[in-house]
Image (tube, rainbow, N blue to C red):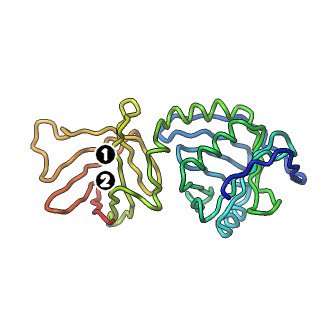
Amino acid sequence: MKRKISLGLALAVGVATPVLAEWTFVAGPTANAFIQSNDSTLELQCDRIRFAPAGYEDSEDIVAKQGLSIRFMKDGTTEVGAFQVGQDNGNVQIVDNFPVEISFNDTQDYGFVLDQLAANASVNLSMIDQDVTYGIFDLTGSSAAIKSLKSACGGAAQETASTEAPEGVVYCGGGAVKRQIEYVILDTPDGEWNALLTVNGEVTRAMTAYSYFGNAEAPKGFVVALLGEDRSETLVFQDGGKDWLEYGDYQYDKCN
């Protein structure tokens, strides 16, 4: 069972106490809401969570167990809901040398987690199926930060397929720089952004440009240019049954 609500369940958390800090929202280049203390950080992105516990050994432990228990507390001791992250509903990995990144297979699961984070007093991130706590974060102010996050992300979380099981065309390669890239043109644009570009799991909003080369003749096979919110430029090509794109200084060929 992926989700559970259990009113009135008391949780023993030992001497662990919530991190006392303020929730902050950052609009870009990657929209996120986060809370940070001297030794740990919890960051919410459009479609994933990043958690940097106090010690690297905790990150290694979470990944080794391929699971994390996210427990929502209405006060310091009473658990009112929980989500158990595991191999059947998400992906757990270490990124950028330290934080644990949790991506969800089902956007409804992530929506449940965000709603609970916005509604409760604190969250306990603990060992899967055990009362061993990696970190507790105060959720005061999380509601406003998550509301801003959802507004900035628009429909991104709902319209982006899991990078572990992509539904669109995926491009791989890159020579000296290996990447997995995919994109989707949105049916409902988010303001000027009408596309999403995913590079190694990182999602960036983008706008399409079909006259990218101005008055010059477009190269053979040119389909569209994706101009990322992070100032990246991606050129998509299709010719003679071959699909590829150019990102940075490298070419990436269709690989699915």
Image: 24 above or below 200: above
Toward which corner of the image does residue 187 lie, by quadrant?
Answer: top left
**Which residue is pictured at 28% across the width and 63% down the height?**
253
Question: Which residue lies under the disc numbered 2?
Answer: 247
Left or right, 41 with respect to 232, comes to right
x and y, in percent, of residue 37 in the image: 73, 43
- Secondary structure, mark 2, is strand
- Secondary structure, mark 1, is strand
- The mark nearer the N terminus, 1 or 2, is 1
Which residue lies most toward the bottom here? Answer: 64
Task: Check the picture and name the quadrant holding the N terminus.
Answer: bottom right
Gap in angstroms between the C-alphas marked 1 and 2: 6 Å
Give yes or no for contact between labels 1 and 2 (Cβ–Cβ under 8 Å): yes
**Which residue is pictured at 41% across the width and 54% down the height?**
199
Image: 56 above or below 113: below
Left or right, 226 with respect to 15, comes to left
Toward which corner of the image does residue 105 lie, by quadrant?
Answer: bottom right
x and y, in percent, of residue 68 in the image: 69, 59
Residue 233: which numbered mark, if any?
A: 1
Task: Check the picture and name the quadrant holding the C terminus.
Answer: bottom left
Left or right, 206 with respect to 85, comes to left
Q: Residues within 10 Å of mark 2 (few under 14, many from 20)?
A: some
Q: Nearer the viewer, residue 188 or 41?
A: 188
Q: Residues within 10 Å of mark 1 (few under 14, many from 20)?
A: some
Toward which corner of the image does residue 177 lie, by quadrant?
Answer: bottom left
Residue 62: which numbered mark, if any?
A: none
Give, as a three-letter code, the residue at label 2: Tyr
